[in-house]
Image (cartoon, helix red, strand yellow):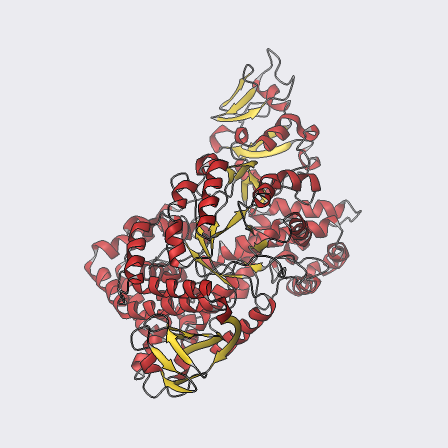
Amino acid sequence: MTETMMRIPSSTYRFQLTSEFDLDVAAEQLPYLERLGVGWVYLSPILQAAPGSTHGYDVVDPSKVDDERGGREALERFSAKARELGLGVLVDIVPNHMGVDTPRDNPWWWDVLAHGRDAAHAESFDIDWEAGDGKLLIPTVGDDDMPRERGDAIANVTVDREAGVLRYHSTEYPLAEGSAPEGASVREVLDNQHYQLIHWRQGDSRLNYRRFFTITSLAGIRVEDDEVFEEAHAEILDWMRHRLVDGLRIDHPDGLRDPGGYLRHLADRTRGAYVLVEKILEGDESLPADWRTAGTTGYDALGQIDRVLVDADSEEFLDELAGVDGTPVDWEQLIHEAKRAVADVSLNAEIRRIARELRSTGLEDDLIEDSVAEIAAHFSVYRSYLPTGSNHLADAADAAKEQRPDLAASIARILPFLEAPEAEAALRLQQTTGMIMAKAVEDRSFYRYARLTSLNEVGGDPNVFSITPERFHELQTARARDWPDAMTTLSTHDTKRGEDTRARITALSEVAEFWAESVAELQNVAPIDDNAFAQLTWQAIIGAWPASRERLNAYLEKAAREADLHTSWTNPNETFEEQLSSAVDAVFDNPVASNIVQNVVAETQAAGWSNSLTAKVVQLTMPGVPDVYQGTELWTRTLVDPDNRQSVDYSSRTAALDAILHGAVPEIDDSGAAKLLVTAACLRLRRSRPELFTEYEGITANGPAAEHALAFSRGGAITIGTRLPIGLEQGGGWIGTTIPLPEGEWIDQLTAAVYTGGKDVPLAAILQQYPVALLAKS
């Protein structure tokens, strides 16, 4: 839970740093953030990453600030300027893994390759040496370079004795001492190393080091070891000691062996600094209460906000529309099949490693791997933290036995070992189930299930179609009570669609029949053979419009390959991908398709704007610390990365903010200035008058349009938003609908209108100019 003495930001603003947008360039935008009302600046990873890294999550040297992002001196300049402006600094750190794609750049990895099990950093990585017969297996060899006959050398490998390296194409690997005597063949030199280069496809089944998800170029590190922790965090802890940084965001804690222990250690070493965890919660799951963290990075809040804006009445219709021949897709079956496929193929090496741990206890059972995979495929959450979450393991085992009676006896035999908190197999299973869940659900099933794709978002369950305002209030009451300092968000560098893209797609739930007719017409012009993927395609185009041909093609290629049904990254299907390209071309080149898209956008544009503004005002004022992802103070109809990591035009935002702060009252139009007004009003009020945001109570409107109001009080501030705006307009608007205001004088921070409380006030008056309001008690 939250430390009582830690500094808590009023809000954060996320910067994605790159070599072009480095710390010095970012520092130039700090005065804009201060005027916007931001409390702390939130930086993407800044430790030394692989050359050319656009995201920073592939750290290769944790002992220094990334040169391409400006280095330590730039961080010091950035922090000093932030301090001058009264801004705190929050930094994203990556304790789970390191980048190893180019070994020369990672001194830890290079050491292990050069010296094997005797390396100083041999214990820094999670390596199963026995599984590689004493060698570290590197899945890098291409199809054309594999040996044709036993005893042949890998093609395109050269030995440079003078430099002390072995090269495969341009990638260098160290030569073990004495491993390349004069006259030795390339094959002999290869055999003498502490590593073995294997075919890239063998990584999924033979890999003998822990990785991040399915990415073999990101190797897991063992921060549960005190020495590894200290070396991996020395630079980070120095930032904290010198007050260059105030708080930390922890990437992927579920990959760690003991997340709770890691957070305790980190809290002790940082004196209880503000720390957030990028943790995905499923359904009613809560963070372990004993974790030393302020809470999550906000995906749970995102999912709740999105769902309270969806028209529940369209669920059955959209289910059938996105199904097969009118039969809805079974979400639970879909994700089970996807998880099982990931366990059997993409992450089979991890399943096999758990099986090896089980067999090392003396178990002899040919069904162990099958049983472990089936249990993992039935996990309803990302992982357990034994003994916490043991019920999830028990439920998964029961479901696995029901699904596969032939495995019941085997599951019963291995379960005691998987239930024991200190057992090696149990510890490793907990690190693996989250990998399987993420890959199968976020990176696969989200692209196969398409009834309303604004709900296919990280941390959300697409099977939960909508929630009522009453349920929303219950959830926020719990958030205010249990995790008041957790982050809330609407967009991140990892969201599948930006908040404004989702807001417009959500509006389709209010015009479901019109949408069905439009998709049928689009399919006649540019057919896509898979009905679900056709839905996903056309929804993406509508949500992101206007978008360039290049952006849409890039998105659909990634989406289709992630779905892994008709095409994939490893086996591209040109025929299916040409269908998708043709659909995009039709939107630009075929007048019929173009008109259909324009008509749907026209039908949903105003509702999308309303949904966006409501989502924004709710997220920025609900319990928690609100984050604004870079650029999203204006409309940003982005799609999945890298589309959502593009550079931001801060000159236009600065000019628009200047106008607003000098009294301009923007219209709701394509400029997005109305969203900037909402963002600035919320952030500035939260920073200047935090005493107004200490409670939470849902407010119920009265009258014929009461269901269209989403309102709550934070004590001295009242938020009002609009739900289902198309239905509201069709029903006659806010006429006859009122909202009770408590005693006192209330000033709308968007329009400066003043309302007297102690009575019901017409919503038609409060929401005359904007579909949202933020009332502050004077």
Q: Please state the horizontal and vertical placement of residue 376, each as a whole percent of the image.
A: 63, 56
Q: Which residue is at a point 46% across and 57% down the rendered structure image?
A: 39
User: Is residue 461 in view?
Assistant: no
Of 214 and 155, which appears nearest the observer? 214
Q: Quadrant of the N terminus?
A: bottom right
Mark count: 0
130 left or right, relative to 559: right
663 left or right, relative to 646: left
Q: Quadrant of the C terminus?
A: bottom left
372 left or right, relative to 733: right
Q: Which residue is at a point 66% across and 26% down the rendered structure image?
A: 115
Kindly give the residue lying farthest to the right in the view shown: 362
Q: Which residue is at a point 34% across and 74% down the rendered structure image?
A: 771
Q: Please state the horizontal and vertical placement of residue 242, each as a whole percent of the image.
A: 57, 43
Eyeballing the image, is 8 above or below 208?
A: below
Eyeballing the image, is 666 above or below 586?
A: below
Q: Please state the horizontal and vertical placement of residue 775, each as a whole percent of the image.
A: 40, 74
User: Is residue 488 in view?
Assistant: yes
In terms of image quadrants, where is residue 709? Answer: bottom left
Kindly give the residue lying farthest to the left in the view shown: 591
In terms of image quadrants, where is residue 670? Answer: bottom left
Eyeballing the image, is 115 above or below 425?
A: above
Q: Please state the horizontal and vertical placement of residue 386, each as a whole percent of the image.
A: 71, 58
In terms of image quadrants, where is residue 478? Answer: bottom right
Q: Which residue is at a point 61% across and 49% down the rendered structure image?
A: 255
681 left or right, relative to 419: left
